[in-house]
Amino acid sequence: MKGSDYNGDITNISNSTETARTCINNERDKTEIYIANSKPFSARYFELDNKMPNTEGSFQADLTITDGKLSGTLVNHTTESLTDAAILMYGRMVKIGTLDAGQVVKLENYALESVPVGANDDIAAHVTAGNGQNFLSYYLRNYLPGFFSGARLVGFVRESSPSFTSDEDIESYGITMVVSSLPVNSTVDGNYSFQALFQDPEVQAGDYDYKTNTISGTVPVELRYHLGEDENINGLSIESLHTESVAATTTDPVGRILPFAGSLDFYNTNTGGFDSMDVSSGKLTAEELAPYLDAENVLTIRYVPLERNTDVNVRLYLPMLTVNAGEVKKQATPAKEPAELQQNATAESTASEKDVSETKETETETKPVTGNTTGGEQ
């Protein structure tokens, strides 16, 4: 029994007609779940894994993300209509809403939002409500706990009479959560983008949580981002979070998580100090970034929260950093000019003749030699 100790005969509990209990019976040809004497509308969650052929169609997508903008199409080739549909990416989300069977969606008409990574309950609440919210939160927590590539389409199908109950006399209803993996293209005309959090940053100072990308609301934090030493970086996008909360006040409850508000200081590799950066535009060009990237494309940022009367348990979501890069153009070794080749050949020939001369002089050291460069006798 999980959550309590019992020293008696468990058979007495299983045979009781009044004790609330849940039983799972694994038989050869089926698995039965019995729920007895539970409180009305109380939730019971079970995870059952099964694989079967897909005969209901699929979702087709052509997604492209460049410079913080989403484009492409999403097509529902299934026979089901989804409610509260959304496309989830690492640190980003697109709310679609209703996605009818056969519907074609042009994604440039929808907003690409930044969301806090690791905040499963907040993301789920932003997408849907009720049991769907619980399902989505469970899925995010157990199947997408860290960094993931590509995108996931999630949506819900409302069922008036679920087919998995054996007693047809019981009034029942339910929902099914649909999840589909979607590819994402981030390269256009040789330029591409990726999240700076594809690799965990190094904590130089302060309190930083890797799983949620949050910091303490009272202490500055210094982080080193490894952006890839082989990348040809041409810009950085700094995306604030879209959350229901906008700013902390003195009445904030304990443990609340809020969007970061404060200053961003970049470490200047030329001066050895930190410079306060104006990131109000949300973008920094390659020229603006150049003094702050070292030889291995490591960027060091110090986040300084605003001074305010914030509880020590309040944490702040950091903005999402998206790196914009281009293809690295390798410079070929220039070919030697014909004159240079001829000069080198002459030098090699002269050196060879000198070697031959020295050899012959050694062989005829008992004979008088006049200094002929060919090593012959006179």
Image: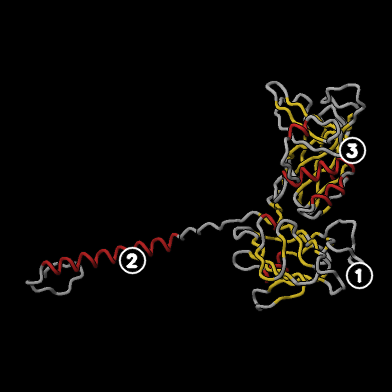
Q: In this rendered view, identify the residue nearer to me: 109 or 137.
A: 137
Looking at the rendering, which quadrant does residue 295 occupy? bottom right
Query: In the rendering, at what x and y percent does residue 358 appear?
Result: 19, 69
The answer to whether residue 62 is visible is yes
Q: How many marks?
A: 3
Query: In the rendering, at what x and y percent does residue 333 appear?
Result: 50, 58
The residue that mark 3 highlights is 39
Give the CA distance from mark 2 to mark 3.
Answer: 99 Å
- Tell me the kind of residue under disc 2: Ala
What crowding class fits label 3: few (fewer than 14 Cα within 10 Å), some (14-19), or many (20 or more)? few
Q: In this rendered view, identify the residue nearer to me: 135 or 268.
A: 135
Give the CA distance from mark 2 to mark 1.
Answer: 83 Å
- Tell me the kind of residue under disc 3: Lys
Looking at the rendering, which quadrant does residue 195 occupy? bottom right
Query: In the rendering, at what x and y percent does residue 60 appear?
Result: 77, 34
Q: Residue 347 shows which numbered tag?
A: 2
SS assignment at label 2: helix
Q: In this rendered view, identify the residue nearer to me: 269 or 309.
A: 309
Quadrant position of the N terminus in the picture: top right
Looking at the rendering, which quadrant does residue 85 occupy? top right
Residue occupying the point 91% across, 25% down: 170
